[in-house]
């Protein structure tokens, strides 16, 4: 079946499709489509999430993340922009996101494991809000425990956009190496990853065929 149909059917059968996986992979698409504007980047976030997550909660969370990255690139404080972003979220899901993205929310108040999209995004925003550096934000996310790799990845996307590349400790970037399966041992290092990032920000060049209902 097409991916979006498979995701929808999985949700219908299992009623469990609001995991944080659509957020974990969203940094690249958020960067790619930031220049397309508010409506377009949020729409793309929803569509890409719908490929694998049939629950609209995942679509809306990914749309929020996309827009947080976009406004940060425009030198707008993403935390200040949150109320306006929440106003653009589907009414059925706005309230739940408003809770986890509120200034006084703490991950200890989460009602689900942070493998779910709500507390994952809330924890990433909390880590950005309560720290003053890229490194401290990542450490705060990891120290929460639970689904640490995804929560830290989402936090890294937000904090990376907020603080910029120079804020990432060189002791973290120098050892980077990403083996590419099927490419005869090819490994991407920092310079290669920076090149890919530069290509991402060149702007949108693709259209997604369908829009989730």
Image: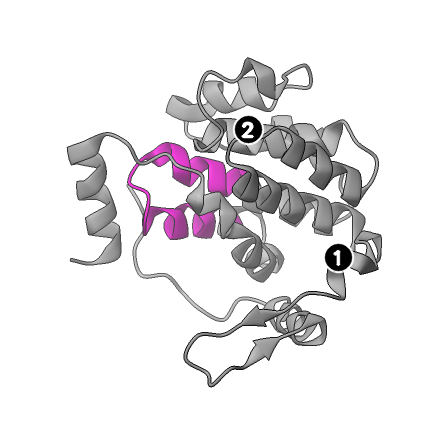
Tell me residue 192's x, y (percent).
66, 76
The disc placed on residue 94 is none
Q: Which residue is drawn at 57% across and 62% down?
A: 32
Q: Which residue is drawn at 65% across and 70% down?
A: 193
Residue position for label 2: 86
Magenta segment, principal secondary structure? Answer: helix
Q: Can residue 21 be spotted in the picture? A: yes
Q: Nearer the viewer, residue 46 or 189?
A: 189
Direction from residue 58 to residue 71 in the image, left or right: right
**Residue 75 colored in magenta in the image:** no
How dense is the environment of label 2, judged by Cα within 10 Å: few (below 14), some, or many (20 and up)? many
Circle 1 or circle 2, nearest the eye: 1
Q: Which of 148 and 28 is in front in this view?
A: 148
Tell me residue 87's x, y (percent).
54, 27
Tell me the quarter of the picture where residue 133 sits.
Answer: top right
Q: Residue at x 62, y 59 (%)?
A: 35
Residue position for label 1: 172
Tell me the quarter of the picture where residue 145 sits.
Answer: top right
Q: Which of 144 and 105 is in front in this view?
A: 144
Tell me the quarter of the picture where residue 134 sits.
Answer: top right
Q: Residue at x 70, y 41 (%)?
A: 138
Tell me residue 195's x, y (percent).
67, 75
Q: For the residues labelled 1 and 2, say whether their Cβ atoms are less than 8 Å apart.
A: no
Q: Which of 115 and 12 is in front in this view?
A: 115
Q: Please state the extent of the stretch shown in magenta in the rendering.
A: 41-64
**Residue 54 colored in magenta in the image:** yes
Q: Is mark 1 on a helix, strand or loop?
A: helix
Q: What element carries label 2?
A: helix
- How far is mark 1 from mark 2, CA to CA? 33 Å
Q: In which quarter of the image is the N terminus?
A: bottom left
Q: Earlier in the sequence, mark 1 or mark 2?
A: 2
Tell me residue 156's x, y (percent).
66, 47
């Amino acid at each position: 079946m097409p991916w979006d149909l498979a995701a929808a059917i999985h949700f219908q059968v299992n009623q469990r499709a609001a995991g944080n996986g659509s957020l974990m992979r969203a940094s690249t698409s958020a960067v790619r489509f930031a220049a397309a504007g508010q409506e377009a980047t949020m729409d793309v976030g929803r569509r890409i999430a719908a490929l694998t997550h049939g629950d609209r909660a995942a679509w809306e969370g990914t749309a929020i993340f996309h827009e947080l990255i976009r406004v940060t690139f425009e030198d707008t404080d993403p935390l200040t922009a949150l109320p306006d972003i929440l106003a653009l979220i589907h009414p059925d899901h706005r309230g739940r996101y408003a809770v986890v993205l509120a200034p006084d929310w703490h991950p200890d108040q989460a009602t689900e494991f942070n493998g779910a999209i709500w507390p994952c995004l809330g924890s990433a925003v909390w880590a950005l809000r309560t720290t003053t550096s890229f490194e401290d934000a990542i450490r705060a996310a990891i120290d929460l425990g639970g689904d640490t790799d995804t929560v830290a990845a989402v936090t890294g996307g937000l904090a990376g956009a907020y603080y910029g590349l120079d804020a990432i400790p060189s002791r973290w970037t120098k050892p980077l190496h990403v083996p590419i399966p099927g490419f005869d041992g090819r490994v991407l290092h920092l310079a290669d990853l920076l090149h890919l990032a530069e290509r991402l920000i060149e702007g949108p060049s693709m259209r997604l065929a369908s829009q989730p209902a």
